[in-house]
Each structure stands twice: as C-alpha cells, then as structure tokens.
C-alpha cells in the first residue's frame, strides 16, 4: 500500500428536509452578508430559491446568478466585483459542479490583489492566499465538488479550461439532498452517472496496489452506479437518487485516492475537448476512456481483469476478461445514450488530436499516467482513435 495523508474538513449534511439547519450553521460562523451564487435559473424555476429566502431572513443577501455550465472566468469576475463591493463575508453556492467550482474560484479571487487569471494560468509564484468561506447546496450529483477542494474554470476566448484548488477551497458545509435531483433533465443525470463512474475508474484502473480496501470501495461504487442506472428514468425515486448522490460525493471526496496509484489522463484530455468544442464534461470522458484503456492495455491489464471479474462478474480467461471489461464499459456509456465517438459530438473534430497534443506539450505534461508512460504522442493516438 502506498503512503498517504488525507484531510477533508467539509461537513456533509445528507438527506431530505435538512435546510432548516442552514441559518444556525451560518450563525455559528458569525456570517452577516451572504452571497447566493447560482446558475442559469433552475434554482428559481423549481422553488429552491424561495425556500432559501424564507430561511435566511436574518441575513443580508446578495444575489449572483448566471454562472454557466463550465463556469466562465469573465462571468465569475463580475461576481468577484460584486462581492467586493458588497463586502460579502460568506458565499452559498446553489447548483451543480459549475456553480460550486465558480464559487471556489471567486472565494480565492475576491481578496487577490492582481489579475486572478495568473493563478489559473499557474504563473510562477501566483497563488490564492486567502479564501472567503463558502458552503454549498448541491443540486446535481456528478463532480464531487461539494466534497473536495478542486475547481475547473473555463476561459472560452482563450479556448482554455484550467484547474485550481488546495486546502483553502473545501466547502465549510454541503447540503446533499437527493430529492433535489427530481427536476434534473435526463442528459444531466446521465452525465452524473458517467462522471462519478469515471472519477472512480481514474483512481482504480492502474495496477494492483495492495490497498485491498480502496480497491473494494472503488468496485463498490462502480457496481452501485451500474445497479442504479434506472435513476435516469426515475429521478424522483429516493432509493435510486440517494445512492447516485452518495456515490458521486464518495467518488471524489479524496477517499478513493488514499494509498493507490491514480491516472487522471482521461480527465485532462476531456477538459481540452470541452475547451475546444464545448462538449459536456462527462461526455468527453466517455469518448476518451475506452480508447485510453485500449492504448494502455498491457499496463492496465491486471486491473482490467480484476474490474471485469468483480464488477461485471466475468469468468474465463484473464486476457479475454480484460478486453471484455473495456467493451462492457463502453456499452454502459452507449446504453445510457452517450456516443463514444468524438465525431458524433462535434463536426469540427478534424485536427483535434494534434490540438490536444500541443496543449499537453505547452503545459509540460509529457509523462502522464500511473507509470508516467503517456507522452504527447500517445495522447495524439488516443484522441485520434476516438474520432
Ligand atoms: O444553470 P442551471 O439553470 O442551474 O441549470 C443547470 C445546468 O444547466 C442544470 N441543473 C443543475 N441542477 C439542476 C439542474 N436542472 C434542473 N434541476 C436541478 N436540480 O444542470 C446543468 C449542468 O450543471 P453543471 O453544474 O454544469 O453540471 P456538473 O455538475 O456536471 O458540473 C460540470 C462542471 O464541473 C467540472 C466540469 O469540468 C464542469 O466544468 N468538474 C469539477 C470537478 C471538481 N470540482 O471536483 C471534477 C469534475 O471532474 C469536473 O471536471
Ligand atoms: Zn469529472
């Protein structure tokens, strides 16, 4: 088992009818001026905002809406200006991964003295040194952002999607109410399943690590997600909805990575496909993962076999099981209605492989994967095979 260290200070408040606790939690933090940050309107449309307003009468509320999917730097900078002007002392993110990620960025940028882009651009020595505290009300189970300290911010004018994070960016608390997902469109439910599934695979499909517990936990999440795919048709079924939300939070709260090798290459390629073509995050992962596993087959074979046996119940020859595990993974995504071909998500795919490869070279990402064996040329091959 590899050495590890883990801290996760976020208080997860899971279940229905928990929002009554919100005022007390804010009081305990001595909060006076709360910015409620939200997306394109679902929070208004389905009545959640009204409930919040009703509960937060004793606080000064500042509203900041319009955070789009794949949150945009320029939009968030407007929120930063507003928060500075209104001297906000707490931010409440109400939404999915995009709103929560946007709030993480804003919470660091508000007190940053220079252009916060330099932090996302990883200019030497540029880091957020303080963050305004924030909490979340999760409305879309997918990213795990409610339970971790990472964020992904887009800047479309530069065709860039950059990551940030660190210990300052854990939410103070996250309300995870599975009944809120009843209003999600099917597309977002599918995205949620695939994103959570892929977070688990990125921390699992490497090589056996002797961390028997983490491997079983990952297999437990994968098996559970397969078991509950009907949630896509029945998001108001609490049994299905609560398990999806629990899986998604658990898949990226920092637990699965403890003591195991990880390979986040599918995500890193996927972020570039979103930056170039605007494809939904989860869908980029479905496009890349099967091709990456084929490309790295020998390196991942042992784990693919274990995955095939334990998650899909395959029996027989180990080599055949490993191959079939990739086929089953792709079939799972296709069965959810997601094509695994880039050309079915954008007509503009010509040259994508070279473009993604060049980004990896520019950023110095020349040795990726659990064995640092994935070079920019490998990236180009993987993306090309996904056309
Ligand atoms: O904007 P509104 O109107 O609220 O609509 C949203 C949005 O259009 C809608 N929605 C959310 N909750 C709803 C709802 N509609 C009806 N009922 C509800 N209860 O869903 C749409 C998509 O929301 P979004 O937040 O963009 O989706 P998701 O949670 O999948 O987040 C994706 C973003 O998170 C990043 C992705 O790269 C992407 O930018 N990620 C963040 C990670 C992290 N911080 O740990 C890890 C992930 O790997 C990922 O990269
Ligand atoms: Zn993801």
Image (cartoon, grey):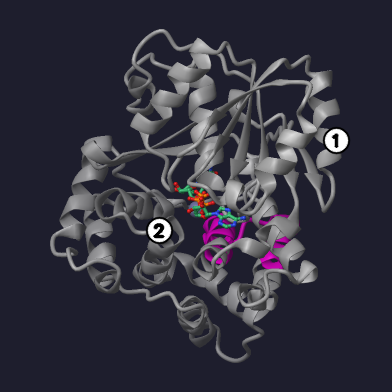
Who is closer to the viewer here, 50 or 181? 50
Name the residue rendered at 40%, 53% in the picture: 265
Mark 1 Cα shell of 10 Å, populated few (<14), some (14-19), many (≥20): few
User: Which is in the foreground here, disc 2 or disc 1?
Assistant: 1
Magenta stretch encompasses residue 231: no
Task: Please name whichever residue, 33 or 288, is drawn nearer the observer in this view of the structure.
Answer: 33
Residue at (63, 82) in percent of width and height: 312
User: Closest to the observer: 79 or 166?
Assistant: 79
Sequence-earlier tag: 2 or 1: 1
Q: Secondary structure at mark 2?
A: loop
Which residue is located at x 46 percent, y 78 percent? 337
Please indicate whether residue 325 sits to the left or right of residue 354 in the image. Answer: right
Span of residues in magenta: 193-221
| Residue 216 horizontal/vertical position (percent) | 73, 64
Image location of residue 120, percent across then percent down: 37, 28
Q: Cβ(mark 2) to ligand 1 < 8 Å?
A: yes
In the image, residue 311 sits, relative to residue 65, either above or below, namely below
In x, y percent, where is residue 10?
73, 34
* Residue farthest toward the bottom in the current orientation of the protein: 316
Pinpoint residue 39: horizontal percent, then vertical percent.
Answer: 51, 43
Q: Is residue 113 above or below residue 49?
A: above
Task: Identify the image quadrant of residue 56.
Answer: top right
* SS at badge 1: helix
Q: Is residue 308 above or below residue 287?
A: below
Distance of label 2 from label 1 (alpha carbons): 33 Å
205 within the magenta span = yes
Relative depth, front residue between 188 and 19: 19
Classified by dominant secondary structure, the portion drawn in magenta counts as helix
Residue located beneath label 1 in the image? 21
Q: Quadrant of residue 254?
A: top right
Judging by the rendered image, the residue that carries numbered circle 2 is: 280
């Amino acid at each position: 088992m590899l050495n590890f260290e883990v801290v996760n200070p976020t208080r997860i408040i899971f279940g229905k009818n928990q929002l009554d606790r919100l005022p007390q939690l804010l009081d305990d933090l001595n909060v006076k001026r709360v910015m409620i940050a939200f997306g394109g309107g679902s929070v208004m449309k389905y009545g959640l905002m009204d409930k919040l307003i009703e509960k937060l009468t004793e606080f000064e509320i500042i509203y900041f809406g319009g955070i789009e999917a794949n949150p945009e730097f320029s939009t968030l900078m407007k929120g930063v200006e507003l928060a500075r002007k209104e001297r906000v002392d707490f931010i409440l993110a109400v939404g999915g991964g995009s709103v929560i990620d946007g709030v993480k960025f804003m919470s660091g940028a508000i007190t940053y003295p220079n252009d916060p882009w330099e932090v996302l651009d990883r200019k030497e020595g540029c880091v957020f040194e303080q963050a305004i505290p924030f909490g979340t009300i999760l409305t879309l189970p997918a990213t795990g952002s409610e339970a971790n300290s990472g964020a992904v911010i887009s800047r479309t004018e530069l065709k860039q999607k950059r990551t940030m994070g660190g210990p300052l960016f854990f939410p103070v608390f996250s309300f995870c109410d599975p009944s809120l997902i009843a209003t999600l469109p099917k597309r977002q439910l599918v995205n949620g399943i695939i994103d959570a599934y892929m977070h688990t695979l990125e921390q699992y499909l490497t090589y056996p690590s002797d961390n028997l517990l983490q491997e079983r936990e990952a297999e437990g999440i994968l098996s559970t997600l397969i078991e509950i795919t009907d949630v896509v048709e029945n998001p108001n079924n609490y049994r299905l909805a609560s398990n999806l939300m629990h899986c998604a939070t658990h898949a990226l709260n920092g637990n699965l990575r403890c003591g195991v090798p990880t390979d986040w290459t599918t995500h890193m390629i996927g972020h570039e496909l979103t930056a170039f073509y605007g494809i939904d995050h989860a869908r980029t992962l479905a496009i890349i993962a099967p091709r990456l596993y084929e490309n790295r087959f020998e390196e991942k074979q042992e784990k693919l076999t274990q995955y095939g046996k334990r998650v899909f119940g395959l029996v027989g020859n180990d080599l055949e099981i490993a191959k079939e595990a990739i086929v089953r993974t792709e079939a799972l995504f296709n069965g959810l209605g997601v094509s695994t071909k880039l050309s079915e998500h954008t007509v503009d795919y010509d040259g994508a492989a070279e473009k993604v490869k060049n980004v990896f070279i520019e950023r110095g990402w020349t040795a990726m994967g659990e064995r640092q064996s994935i070079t920019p040329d490998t990236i180009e091959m993987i993306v090309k095979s996904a056309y």
